[in-house]
Amino acid sequence: MPGTTTKERIGRVGQRRQVVIPKEILESLNMREGDLVAVAQRGDSVVIKRKTLVDPDDVLTPAEGALVKKAEREMKQGKYVTLAQLHHDLARKSSQRRRKTA
């Protein structure tokens, strides 16, 4: 449950400044080995937060997000084209653009 406080646990700082997060806390936060964390000092306390890194180039614009949602709705309705059909249609459109008309 987010926001729920867990009973305080005692840990130890290891030789390489490593701190073990108790299993119950790790599981309640849905974290696992290899996850990234942000560490901050607040007075005489250390705060550790789960962190997700996002590449700004991977973030969709509102218009792109709307297109993705529309595509998801259409796929759920059974409206889709195969990848082969998409390639065929794109190739056809590009060849039509190359033709010159008098």
Image (spheres, grey):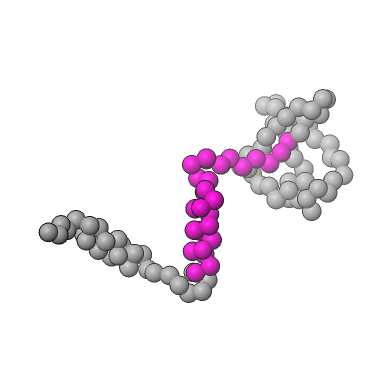
The image quadrant that residue 17 belongs to is top right
Measuring from the top left, give residue 10's x and y in whole percent: 84, 36
Q: Is residue 6 above or below residue 70?
A: above
Measuring from the top left, give residue 9's x and y in whole percent: 84, 40
Side (left or right) of 81 relative to 73: left
Side (left or right) of 74 relative to 83: right
Q: Is residue 31 above or below residue 41?
A: below
Quadrant of the image for the C terminus?
A: bottom left
Side (left or right) of 74 relative to 2: left
Within the magenta stretch, is there residue 12? no
96 and 4: which is toward the camera: 96
Farthest right residue in view: 7
Give the residue at x 52% y 40%: 56
Farthest left residue in view: 102
Farthest front residue in view: 102
Side (left or right) of 5 relative to 53: right
Residue segment shown in magenta: 48-74
Give the residue at x 79% y 28%: 42
Q: Is residue 67 above or below residue 76?
A: above
Give the residue at x 87% y 44%: 7
Give the residue at x 49% y 64%: 71
Within the magenta stretch, is there residue 65? yes
Measuring from the top left, give residue 36's x and y in whole percent: 63, 39
